[in-house]
Image: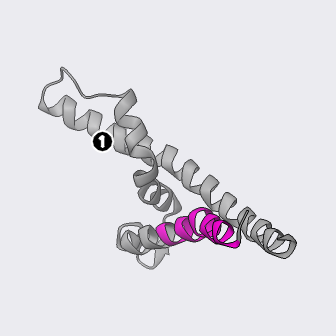
Amino acid sequence: MTRGEIWKDLLKHTVLPLIIALFLFLIFKSVFTKNGETEYFYVWLCCGIPFGIRRMFVWLVPHGYDLGGTVGMIAVNFIIGGLIGGVILTWRLVVAVWYIPLTIYRLLTN
């Protein structure tokens, strides 16, 4: 790998997921902080929605319901998508931490 590819790989796998996670945390901070206490389930749910919601609308499609059923199915999609997205976000952050020593190794051996 060239140095440019190594830096591109570092940005793609480390910097970008960390920036996205921090951005989501700062956006939704008012949602999951009540009386100065952080509710970690809401952190998991709110920060995971962008990572998991596109997978949920494939599985649970709100079709053939009345208005209440459709709104309920969309809410369930958001909740389950947030839970799945929280797992995906956690995995991407673990990969981001793994890529730091890997990038150092690649730069030193290149």
Q: Is residue 53 inside the magenta stretch?
A: no
Given residues 51 and 100, the one toward you in this image is 100
Q: Residue at left 55%, top 55%?
A: 89
Q: Residue at left 63%, top 64%?
A: 9
**Residue under pointer 1:** 75
Q: Position of residue 77 (x, y in %)?
A: 35, 38
Q: Position of residue 29 (x, y in %)?
A: 40, 73
Residue at the extreme right: 109
Residue numbers of the magenta segment: 3-20
Residue at the extreme left: 67
| Quarter residue 107 falls in | bottom right
Lateral position of residue 66 relative to residue 33, left or right? left
- Crowdedness of circle 1 by 10 Å Cα count: few (<14), some, many (20+)? few
Q: How many marks?
A: 1
Given residues 25 and 94, the one toward you in this image is 94
Lateral position of residue 28 relative to residue 5, left or right? left
Whether residue 80 is situated above or below residue 32 in the rendered picture: above
Q: Residue at left 34%, top 35%?
A: 57
Residue at the extreme top: 64
The secondary structure that dominates the magenta segment is helix
Q: What amino acid is at disc 1?
A: Ala
Residue at the extreme front: 2
Q: Residue at left 47%, top 54%?
A: 48
Q: Is residue 11 inside the magenta stretch?
A: yes
